[in-house]
Image: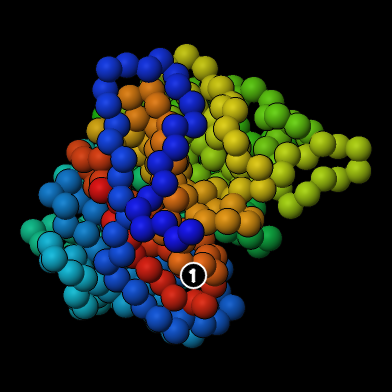
């Protein structure tokens, strides 16, 4: 049976309260047909939204791995927009501050800030390639970088203070990669760092770094199977991590074949027990009002998002149109409970949905 509206299921109750969460509905707002080529499904496009509800999209041009089509939502429909000069390169990404008052766009090694309704280039002279990005406020933007003779052999961090980019010392000398950063605001930064041994999570408050030990993940080996794949921070006491699912099991070691989710509650990290068997988690995003959103691409079935808000989980599946390849990017509308999502169908069609 085809489902016209989103299927919303309560998955768990954690500290339930009197807040009611009404069912949300998916609405298709844009379709770009005929996208082909051997391109990673996580590098096909990106979405960005401000607190005023202004939305932007970058979509990969057909068979052009370094050319992007820009769209702008005018309140009614998506319309073509001229990308700023210099837009190009791989790994397009938007990043908004938690309050939604500042939006940045990154393509390749070029950062742009949305100022006065136009995109302004903020030249960044990193020593290596741009990695993860995070925006705490207009004067609190972070870029991690990686590179070196063997790739990932070196890592760095840069910080925008409202006037210029400055290098920031790494947590330790053995760090050779900073794959994920998240900024809840007020100058604080969370980061996943990798060096000798397993990945670890650290927090920077002011000028110093502090470790926040992560307990062993379920299964074996103790490090998350598939590695960390995303990080989001709603506040200093509410930070989230997701992993990819493992491809299968290895020998006598019970490698989880599901995505995993961990949460920092202000005192410790805790792995959450969610029904994510054979489910890949491509993205996580946070908003101070809308809660935490996790995109989920099951190996068989419709893609869906999980939303944690007011102590409750809800699940909203995309309409059953068939042939799904999964989510590419999600972007909450800051200060609301609405969500924009970019998804890919099996025939190569890129679709932009609104969940409201």
Residue drawn at the location 41% of the way across and 36% of the way down: 314
Residue drawn at the location 49% of the way across and 70% of the way down: 345
Residue drawn at the location 40% of the way across and 41% of the way down: 8
Question: For the image shown, how many numbered marks are present on the structure?
Answer: 1
Residue holding disc 1: 345
Picture coordinates of residue 222, whole percent (x, y): 74, 31
Taking depth in this image into account, of 43 and 27 the one nearest to the observer is 27
Image height check: is 323 above or below 97? Answer: below
Picture coordinates of residue 277, whole percent (x, y): 66, 42
Q: Is residue 207 left or right of residue 250?
A: left
Picture coordinates of residue 334, whole percent (x, y): 23, 43
Outermost residue toward the front in this view = 1
Taking depth in this image into account, of 50 and 153 the one nearest to the observer is 50
Badge 1 density bin: few <14, some 14–19, many ≥20, Cα 10 Å? some
Q: Is residue 145 left or right of residue 300?
A: left
Taking depth in this image into account, of 153 and 240 the one nearest to the observer is 240
Image height check: is 218 above or below 98? Answer: above
Q: Is residue 318 left or right of residue 355?
A: right
Corner quadrant of residue 284: top left
Circle 1 — which element? strand
Image height check: is 158 above or below 322? Answer: above
């Amino acid at each position: 049976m085809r489902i016209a509206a989103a299927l919303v299921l309560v998955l768990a109750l954690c500290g339930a309260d009197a807040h009611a969460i009404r069912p949300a509905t998916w609405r298709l707002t844009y379709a770009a047909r005929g996208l082909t080529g051997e391109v990673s499904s996580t590098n096909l496009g990106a979405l960005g939204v401000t607190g005023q509800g202004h939305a932007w999209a970058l979509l990969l041009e057909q068979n052009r791995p370094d050319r992007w089509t820009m769209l702008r939502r005018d309140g009614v429909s998506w319309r073509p927009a001229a990308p700023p000069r210099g837009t190009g390169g791989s790994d397009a990404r938007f990043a908004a501050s938690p309050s939604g008052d500042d939006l940045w766009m990154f393509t390749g090694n070029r950062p742009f800030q949305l100022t006065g309704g136009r995109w302004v280039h903020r030249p960044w002279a990193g020593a290596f390639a741009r990695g993860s990005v995070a925006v705490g406020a207009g004067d609190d933007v972070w870029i991690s970088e990686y590179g070196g003779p063997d790739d990932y052999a070196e890592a760095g961090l840069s910080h925008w203070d409202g006037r210029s980019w400055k290098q920031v010392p790494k947590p330790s000398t053995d760090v050779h990669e900073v794959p994920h950063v998240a900024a809840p605001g007020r100058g604080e930064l969370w980061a996943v760092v990798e060096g000798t041994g397993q990945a670890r999570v650290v927090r920077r408050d002011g000028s110093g770094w502090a470790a926040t030990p992560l307990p062993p993940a379920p299964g074996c080996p103790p490090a998350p199977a598939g590695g960390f794949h995303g990080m989001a921070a709603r506040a200093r006491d509410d930070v989230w991590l997701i992993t990819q699912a493992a491809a299968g099991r290895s020998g006598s070691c019970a490698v989880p074949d599901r995505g995993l989710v961990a949460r920092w509650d202000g005192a410790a990290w805790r792995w959450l027990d969610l029904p994510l068997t054979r489910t890949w988690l491509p993205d996580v995003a946070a908003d101070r009002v809308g809660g935490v959103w996790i995109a989920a691409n099951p190996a068989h079935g419709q893609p869906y998002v999980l939303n944690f808000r007011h102590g409750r989980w809800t699940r909203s599946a995309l309409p059953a149109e068939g042939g799904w390849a999964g989510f590419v990017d999600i972007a909450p509308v800051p200060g609301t409970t609405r969500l924009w999502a970019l998804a890919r169908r099996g025939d190569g069609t890129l679709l932009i949905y609104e969940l409201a």
